[in-house]
Amino acid sequence: MEKYFKMLSDSTSLPAGLFRLLFVLLVGYIVIRIVMRAVRRMLEKSAFDESSYVVIMRTVRIILWILLGLTLISTAGVNTTPFVAVLASIGGALALAMKDSLSNVAGGVIILVSKPFVKGDEIEIEDVSGIVDYIDLMDTRLHTFSNQMIKVPNSKVVNSILINRTRNDIVRVDCKFSVSYDSDLAKVKELLNNIVKDGDVLLEDPKPVIGVSSYEESGVVWDMYVWARTEERFKAKYYLGETVKSVFDANGIRIPFPHVDVTIEGENDK
C-alpha cells in the first residue's frame, strides 16, 4: 500500500501522506454509508417505533464521524491522545454550558425507552396537542389537525403531564343535553338509548351511561356517556349532536332555550 501511495505521489507530485489521508477519508465515508444503511435495516426489523429512527440514526452518524476524524489524525502521524483529552475537556465544558440541551437529549433517550407514544399517536402536553411525526435529538415533532408543525423540547415531554388520546382502541364520548321540565323523563331515556343502538359509529359494549345530571334553571340536564372506536370519536360526537335534536323534535321533546317574559303595565291597570 505504501508503494502504491508513493507511485501516486511521484506521478502527481503530491505528498504520499495526502493520498493516504484521502484514501482513509474515502474508505471511511463508504464504511459510514454502509453502516448507516445496516443500522436502518436493523431498526426496521427491531421493536423500535419509526418515530425514534431519527435520533438513533443521527447519534450513530455523529459517533462514526468522530471516530473517522480520530482515524484521520492518527493516519497523519499525530498522537491522538491529546485530542482525546481535549475532546473530553471540551465535552465537560459543553456539558455545563449546554445542560438544558443535554437534558433534552436525555429526555429523548427516556422517550425511546419508555415509549409513551409512537408515530401517528395524538398526544397533548400541557397546552400543546398534535399528532407525532418523529422524535429528534432535541425535541419531538408534532403536527396539528390544521397541519401546523410543533416542536416540543424532549425535557418538557418527559417532565410534563402527557395525554395519549389514541393509544387505546376505544374511547368514551361525553355529551350533555337539556330538556324542558315538562318532558317525560322515561321517554327521554328510551329515545337516547335507541339513538345509541341505531348509531353505527357508537358501541353498545361497553354499555353507555345515560342519566339525569342536574336540574338547572332552564331545564333538566342529561349526561350521555357512550363509547366509540378511537378513529371515529369525532364522527360519534357529531352524530349525537345532530341526531338527538332530530329525534327530540320528532317526539315532541322540547329543548329549552333562554327566553324573557315581559309584562307591560298600563295606566288603567289596578
Image: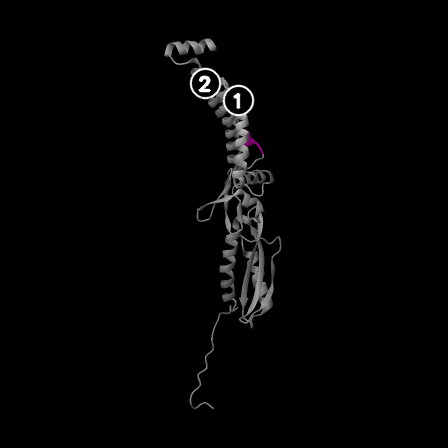
Could you say which is closer to the camera, residue 45 or residue 183? Answer: 45
Q: Amino acid at mark 2?
A: Leu
Looking at the picture, how far across and down is residue 223, in whole percent? 58, 62
As for residue 192 lying within the magenta part, the answer is: no
260 to the left or right of 181:
left
Helix, strand or loop at mark 1: loop
Q: Looking at the magenta stretch, what is its main secondary structure?
A: helix
Looking at the picture, how far across and down is residue 110, in whole percent? 58, 39
Helix, strand or loop at mark 2: helix
Q: Amino acid at mark 1?
A: Thr
Which residue in the protein does label 1 denote?
80
Span highlighted in magenta in the image: 42-46
Looking at the picture, how far across and down is residue 259, in whole percent? 47, 73
The answer to whether any part of residue 89 appears in the image is yes
As for residue 44 lying within the magenta part, the answer is: yes
Residue at 57%, 44% (x, y): give it. Answer: 158
Residue 269, picture quadrant: bottom left
Residue at 51%, 23% (x, y): give it. Answer: 70
113 to the left or right of 37:
right
Which residue in the protein does label 2 denote?
21
Is the residue marked by circle 2 packed among few (<14), some (14-19), or many (20+) residues within 10 Å?
Answer: some
Q: CA distance from mark 1 to mark 2?
A: 15 Å
Mark 1 or 2, nearer chain start: 2
Could you say which is closer to the camera, residue 230 or residue 62? Answer: 62
Could you say which is closer to the camera, residue 202 or residue 29? Answer: 29
